[in-house]
Amino acid sequence: MYFEATTPEALATAVRVAREEDVDFFLLGSGANILIGDRGFSGLVIANQARSLTVKGTRVFAASGALIYPDVIDAAVGHSLSGLEHYVGIPSTVGGALWQNLHFLSPAPERERTMFIGEVLESADILTADNERRIVDVDYFEFGYDQSVLHQRDDIVLSATFELEPANGEALARVMEENLRWRGERHPPLDTEPSAGSIFRKIDGIGAGRLIDEAGLKGFTWGGAQISPRHANIIVNRGGATAADVCALIMHTQKTVEAATGYWLTPEISFVGDFAPVKRVRQSATG
Ligand SMILES: NC(=O)C1=CN([C@@H]2O[C@H](COP(=O)(O)OP(=O)(O)OC[C@H]3O[C@@H](n4cnc5c(N)ncnc54)[C@H](OP(=O)(O)O)[C@@H]3O)[C@@H](O)[C@H]2O)C=CC1
Ligand SMILES: C=C(O[C@H]1[C@H](O)[C@@H](CO)O[C@H](OP(=O)(O)OP(=O)(O)OC[C@H]2O[C@@H](n3ccc(=O)[nH]c3=O)[C@H](O)[C@@H]2O)[C@@H]1NC(C)=O)C(=O)O
């Protein structure tokens, strides 16, 4: 079953009804950070297409299905407001961004720290696990790196308010251009080489991508899936990749990197729905 929620109210109603009727449901943002099993999802998929946006003074009010890029960033930058421009080029809805505390490196040339969307969040309208509507402030989310309270609680973000800073339009345009260039040079392009972004979690001070690269796995291919020759922590769909192909590559990468370095890589993406059995990568396979 599939339902498109086009307003925060419709989203809240869909979730409430699914819970009351005891129907398994999955809330789909832009689908940028998930792998869906080859046997699909048996239950209700609620696609979050609640995309309304308003800017008042230095505040941006966004429904949780609004796309951070381009919609929310365009609205903020169009009003010369700073705080969201760092996340240019990253696929995500507002809800997905709060779930994972969307992040990117601080502006060039320093790039000395990671910036998080939690830094500009003021409050959010949520539907709690008990089906109650609440306005919560930023502290409620307990944000960390790739972390928020939403990983532990079944709350649904319906809309969010961001508090931004007035800024010079040229400075905003420069940050956006530099960040798009940074991503363009390091990450495979999403339109021609689709992926779910980083497959494995960050390993502080070491780098998941570096370990996979040093294990010699760049370009390794299984079925339609390939460890990107450009960035080793990204698995791209070269055409016709199945979820089983991606899972086989994930398991092969974990085992190869552990044998070479002693580190065990943990997936960063979410696995959704029902998965077909995974054929293991033959040890003799060379890609
Ligand atoms: N830094 C980068 O370069 C990249 C980052 N990403 C990250 O991936 C995420 C992609 O977002 P998006 O495509 O929208 O999400 P997805 O559709 O990929 O869903 C990811 C998870 O977000 C949760 N979620 C989505 N919407 C809501 C909501 N309204 N309320 C509560 N939880 C929600 C769901 O959790 P549950 O199952 O618990 O309901 C879901 O499992 C972003 O956080 C982005 O930072 C992705 C690619 C690249
Ligand atoms: C792409 C994502 O997030 C990105 C985010 O966009 C950028 C910028 O802030 O920082 C992280 O990338 P990253 O490239 O630094 O992450 P890792 O894969 O851990 O790589 C760490 C380091 O390894 C090195 N590296 C990476 C790839 C490669 O093929 N070879 C290599 O040597 C690079 O020096 C790199 O900087 C996030 N990834 C993780 C796992 O934390 C995502 O969440 O999907």
Image: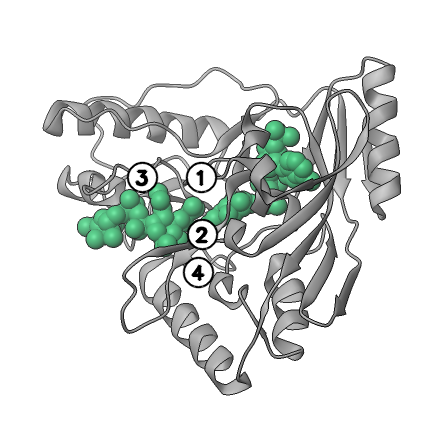
Label 1 lies in ligand 2 vicinity (Cβ under 8 Å): yes
Q: Nearer the viewer, mark 4 or mark 3?
A: 3
- Label 3 SS: loop
Which is more toward the observer, 171 or 13? 171
Question: Do the CB atoms of the residues marked 3 and 1 lie less than 8 Å apart?
Answer: yes
Q: Earlier in the sequence, mark 1 or mark 2?
A: 2
Q: Earlier in the sequence, mark 3 or mark 1?
A: 1
Query: Which badge, 4 or 3, comes first in the chain's sequence?
Result: 4
Circle 2 or circle 4, nearest the eye: 2
Q: Name the residue nearer the viewer: 248 or 116.
A: 116
Whether label 4 lies within 8 Å of ligand 1 gets the answer: no
Q: How is the image coloured?
A: one colour
Three-letter amino acid code at the position of disc 1: Asp
- Residue beneath label 1, please? 146
Q: Quadrant of ligand 1?
A: top right
Lateral position of residue 47 relative to residue 283, left or right:
right
Q: CA distance from mark 1 to mark 2?
A: 8 Å
Using the image, tell me which numbered label, if any, was put on residue 103: 2
Q: Which residue is mark 3?
A: 202
Do tag 1 and tag 2 residues touch (Cβ < 8 Å)? yes
Pointer 4 with pointer 1, Cβ within 8 A: no
| Quarter occupied by residue 127 | top right
Residue lying at 39% horizontally and 38% vertically, measured from the top left: 199
Q: Are marks 4 and 3 in contact (CB under 8 Å)?
A: no
Is label 3's Cβ within 8 Å of ligand 2? yes
Q: Which residue is mark 4?
A: 189
**Crowding near the residue tagged with mark 4, few <14, some 14–19, many ≥20 C-alpha atoms within 10 Å:** some
